[in-house]
Image (cartoon, helix red, strand yellow):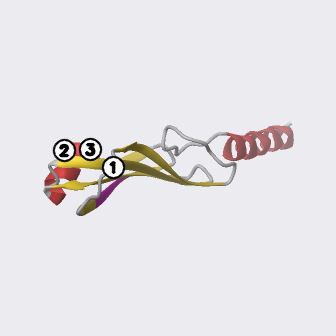
Amino acid sequence: MVQKKITLGFVFLIFHLLLVSCASPGFGPRGFLFTKTKIGVFGTGETSKRRVTSCIHSILGLFSFGDASFEFLKSRSKIQTVTETNWTTFVVLGVYANLCVEISGNE
């Protein structure tokens, strides 16, 4: 009886690790074991003089930290006019995930 519960628990754990992604960037396509994507969100086609990137991170979907807001990015780079915005996602086994926001623009 105890061995059956242990086996059932082990099967549930494997199922959970393989099919449920705990850490997720929240959008975009996801790979089963690994994800690395870049999504162009906005672009005017104008040339830009400045570029800045900031990321937010998630570990097991339990801990999340970082600041990738437009206000933070614009203040860090002194960009006044945004000409391009890209999002980059990265996930490994649903254990670690990050979402990076990159903006380009001019003063």
* Residue corresponding to mark 2: 71
Give the structural element (helix, strand or loop) at label 1.
strand
* Residue corresponding to mark 1: 84
Nearer to us in this view, 87 or 7: 87
Give the structural element (helix, strand or loop) at label 2.
helix
Query: The C terminus lies in which quarter of the figure?
Result: bottom left
Q: Which residues are magenta?
A: 52-56
106 left or right, relative to 66: left
Residue 8, numbered circle: none
Residue 9: % across, % down: 75, 40
The number of numbered badges drawn on the structure is 3
Q: Tell me if I can see residue 67 in this picture.
A: no
**Amino acid type shown at disc 1:** Glu
Q: Is residue 29 magenta?
A: no
Badge 1: residue crowd in 10 Å (few <14, some 14–19, many ≥20): some
Front position among marks 1 and 2 = 1
Q: Is residue 55 magenta?
A: yes
The answer for how far apart the CA atoms under marks 1 and 3 are is: 15 Å
Residue 47: % across, % down: 29, 58
Front position among marks 1 and 3 = 1
**Amino acid type shown at disc 2:** Glu
* Residue corresponding to mark 3: 69
